[in-house]
Image (cartoon, helix red, strand yellow):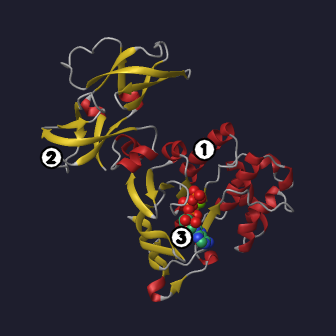
Amino acid sequence: MSFVTIERLDKRFGAEHAVRGLSLSVARGEFVTLLGPSGCGKTTTLRCVAGLERPDGGEIRIDGETVAAPARGLHLDPEDRNIGMVFQSYAVWPHMTVFDNVAYGLRVRRVVGAELKERTMKTLDLVGLAGLAQRYATRLSGGQRQRVALARAIAYRPRVILFDEPLSNLDAKLREQMRLELTRLQHEVGITSIYVTHDQAEALAMSDRVVVMNEGTIQQVADPQTIYTAPENAFVAKFIGVANLLEAKFVARNGATCELEVPLGEPRPPARLHASGGEHSSAGARVFLCLRPEDLALSSEPPRGCGGVNAMAGEVVDTVYLGTHLECRVKLGCRELCVQAAHQRHFDTGQKVFVSFDPRHALCLAS
Ligand SMILES: Nc1ncnc2c1ncn2[C@@H]1O[C@H](COP(=O)(O)OP(=O)(O)OP(=O)(O)O)[C@@H](O)[C@H]1O
Ligand SMILES: [Mg+2]
């Protein structure tokens, strides 16, 4: 059952078509992340849900109540939508204590006395700030301020909470810690959440479902594992993680796999490779072969057992030791692939190598 429903949402700023007929359903208690490059319309979508922007078309419903329907002239103000918001800049009030910052939303809703105190302290406890209740917000670290912003947004138990890159001002370590805390908290409190980020690691780590956007439209909606292992197109594959995308020509299907021809530049003949996917492609179609660096094997001898299928001869052009693994760039004719090898291995620049892969871990994607 959909709790937040966005239907054919459209928003223009003059000539700029920021959101183009976007439809999305979010279930009660679900954590959904909008992910995409700068300018793809994430913030605009969120602001339309919040009521801070008036859409040009479409409809938005929350828990069965229509909050925006421009065709019918319907627009609920933000304060009438019962939505919590946490933004990138620490939107805490510096002239107030931590307690008063968090109590604000409850006071506005006429909660007073012992109940006000209890609910505020309980929320502060949830975010680990009970000990700092009387401290002024100016005398807090970045992470603590962002926790105040979070506590303030959840204190009055809104129907939905909207996050717009709430962790992007924090340093890497704190960001990772807050990421864990936020997910734990969201599960504990169970508030329906729409989260915006352009950090793919954050999106994969935190979300029930990820919405990949580009130029005001949705490219794919799926759980993190599906988004990573079965991207629907080259844009999604490229945007999530590192993907080697090779232009290829679709040759034929053979049961569960398909055969592709990948040009490697004259005078080398094109490589004939096998991959999965490509159900909708026909012979001669232009496609992409998507190979994740961690799904590629590197060897100095031709790999045995696969009769030369899915093995390509190349030359190491560069290696970088990253502790957890070795990252190698391998030149195959006019192409270059990024390949991950185990950290104990060693390859020299200029070394002749073979790159091979299992067709089940190679994807044929529509261009
Ligand atoms: N108030 C505005 N006036 C004019 N154009 C706007 C306005 N707000 C957004 N836009 C444009 O709409 C498009 C979408 O912007 P939006 O802020 O939604 O992107 P975003 O995905 O949140 O990007 P970022 O990751 O950089 O925050 C952009 O091209 C932007 O320039
Ligand atoms: Mg934005």
Look at label 2 and name its amino acid. Ala
Left or right: 92 as drawn, with respect to 364: right
- Which residue is rendered at x = 80% and y = 58% of the image? 99
- Per the rendering, the mark at residue 179 is 1
Residue found 58% across the figure and 75% down from its top: 53
- Vertically, is 102 above or below 330? below
The residue lying at 39 percent from left, 20 percent from top is: 315
Q: What is the three-letter code of the residue carrying label 1?
A: Arg
In the rendered view, tell whether residue 193 sits above or below residue 142. below
Left or right: where 73 falls relative to 50: left
The single residue placed furthest to the bottom in the displayed view is 73
In percent of width and height, residue 229 lies at 36, 40
- Between residue 338 and residue 165, name the one nearer to us: 338
Q: Tell me the crowding category of disc 3: few under 14, some 14 to 19, or many 20 or more residues within 10 angstroms, Cα based.
A: many
Identify the residue position indicated by label 2 in the image. 283
From the viewer's side, name the closer residue of 269 and 26.
269
State the residue position of label 3. 49
